[in-house]
C-alpha cells in the first residue's frame, strides 16, 4: 500500500480512507450521468441518511458529554420549517450559553405524532448540584420560550438533560437510534420535513489516512473479519469498525526488514 490522494467511486478498488472507527473503500471510475430528479416531500428516514448519521457518530473526533431531549407541549406544529426555526433558536442560545459547544442533533416522532429532538453536545454538565439544576432550568425555559409554549406543565417536563457517562455512550446510542425504525415514520400530516439530522461543522469525520491498494489487499486484511463478504460478493463501500485492522496491518508493513 502507498500514499494516494483522490479517487472516484465506481470501478475497481484503488484505495481506502481510514477514519476513527470505519474504513471507506474507494473505487476508480465515473458513474453514468443521470438527470437529477425533482426532490419530493420527504416521507421517511432513508437508509442512506441513517447510515450517514451512524458513520458521523462513529467517526467524529468530538466527544459528546451531554444529551438534551426537546419535546413539544400538547399543542405542537406539523410544519418542519417551524420546528427547525425553534431548533435553530435553541441552538443559537445553547452555543452562546456554553461558549461554543459542538453538537449533533436528530429528529424523531412520538406516538402521538409530535416531533422531538435529541441533541448531543460536547459541553459537560456542571459539576455541582446547584449548577446542574440551574443549567437544566435554562435549557427548559429557553425551549419553552422558543416554541411559545404557554403550558406550565411543558416548562416543567418539556426537556430532559442528562450526562453521557462514557465516551462510547453517544456513539452507541446514535448508531442504535439510526438503525432502529421505531419512531422514524413521518406522520402523514407533517409537512416540509427537511433534514432529519444535522451537526456543527467540526463534528464531521476527518480521514486519518488514505492509501492506495487493490481489492486483494483489502480482502487480505479483513480475511478473519466476521462480516467479510464472500469472494463472489461485491466489497462493501464502508467496512464498519475495521480501522484498527488496517492501521495495525500498515504499522506492521512499515516495520518489516
Image (cartoon, rainbow, N blue to C red):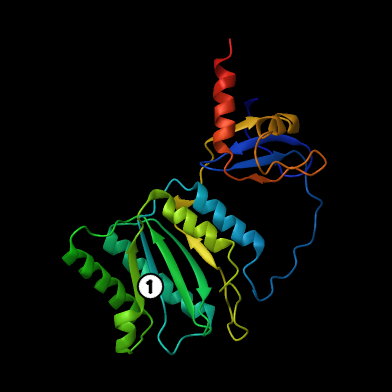
Q: Using the rendered view, name the quadrant where residue 152 is placed.
A: bottom left
Asked whether 205 or 134 is in front, the reply is 134
Q: Picture coordinates of residue 85 (x, y %)?
A: 44, 75
> Dividing the image into 4 quarters, which one contains the N terminus?
top right
Q: Is residue 137 left or right of residue 42?
A: left
Q: Is residue 138 above or below residue 253?
A: below
Asked if one can make out residue 115 in the rendered structure from this viewpoint, the answer is yes
Q: Picture coordinates of residue 146 (x, y %)?
A: 36, 79
Q: Secondary structure at mark 1?
A: helix
Asked whether 227 or 85 is in front, the reply is 227
Q: Is residue 130 left or right of residue 97?
A: left
Picture mark count: 1
Q: Picture coordinates of residue 66 (x, y %)?
A: 35, 60
Q: Is residue 216 left or right of residue 69?
A: right
Q: Is residue 68 above or below residue 12?
A: below
> Dividing the image into 4 quarters, which one contains the C terminus?
top right
Residue that extends furthest to the top in the rendered view of this protein: 257
Q: Is residue 184 above or below residue 2?
A: below
Label 1: how many Cα within 10 Å (few below 14, some 14–19, many 20+): some
Q: Picture coordinates of residue 37 (x, y %)?
A: 75, 67
Q: Using the rendered view, name the quadrant where residue 65 is placed.
A: bottom left
Q: Is residue 91 left or right of residue 183?
A: left
Residue at 60 percent of width and 77 percent of height: 186
Asked whether 27 or 220 is in front, the reply is 220
Q: Which residue in the structure is indicated by mark 1?
A: 89
Residue at 67 percent of width and 40 percent of height: 25
Asked if one can make out residue 145 in the rendered structure from this viewpoint, the answer is no
Amino acid at each position: 500500500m502507498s500514499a494516494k490522494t483522490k479517487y472516484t467511486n465506481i470501478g475497481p478498488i484503488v484505495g481506502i480512507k481510514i477514519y476513527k472507527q470505519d474504513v471507506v473503500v474507494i473505487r476508480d471510475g465515473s458513474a453514468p450521468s443521470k438527470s437529477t430528479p425533482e426532490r419530493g416531500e420527504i416521507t421517511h428516514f432513508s437508509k442512506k441518511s441513517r447510515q450517514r448519521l451512524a458513520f458521523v457518530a462513529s467517526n467524529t473526533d468530538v466527544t459528546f458529554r451531554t444529551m438534551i431531549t426537546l419535546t413539544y407541549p400538547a399543542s405542537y406544529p406539523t410544519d418542519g420549517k417551524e420546528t427547525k426555526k425553534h431548533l435553530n433558536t435553541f441552538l443559537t442560545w445553547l452555543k452562546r450559553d456554553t461558549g461554543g459547544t459542538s453538537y449533533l442533533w436528530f429528529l424523531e416522532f412520538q406516538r402521538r405524532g409530535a416531533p422531538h429532538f435529541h441533541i448531543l453536545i460536547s459541553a459537560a454538565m456542571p459539576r455541582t448540584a446547584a449548577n446542574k439544576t440551574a443549567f437544566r432550568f435554562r435549557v427548559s425555559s429557553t425551549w419553552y420560550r422558543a416554541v411559545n409554549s404557554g403550558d406550565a406543565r411543558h416548562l416543567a417536563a418539556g426537556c430532559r438533560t442528562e450526562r453521557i457517562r462514557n465516551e462510547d455512550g453517544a456513539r452507541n446510542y446514535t448508531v442504535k437510534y439510526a438503525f432502529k425504525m421505531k419512531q422514524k415514520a413521518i406522520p402523514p400530516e407533517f409537512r416540509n420535513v427537511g433534514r432529519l439530522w444535522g451537526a456543527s461543522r467540526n463534528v464531521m469525520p476527518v480521514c486519518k489516512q488514505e492509501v492506495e491498494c487493490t481489492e486483494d489487499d483489502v480482502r487480505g486484511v479483513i480475511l478473519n473479519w466476521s462480516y467479510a463478504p464472500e469472494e463472489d460478493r461485491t466489497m462493501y463501500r464502508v467496512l464498519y469498525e475495521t480501522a484498527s485492522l488496517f492501521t495495525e496491518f500498515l504499522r506492521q508493513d512499515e516495520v518489516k526488514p
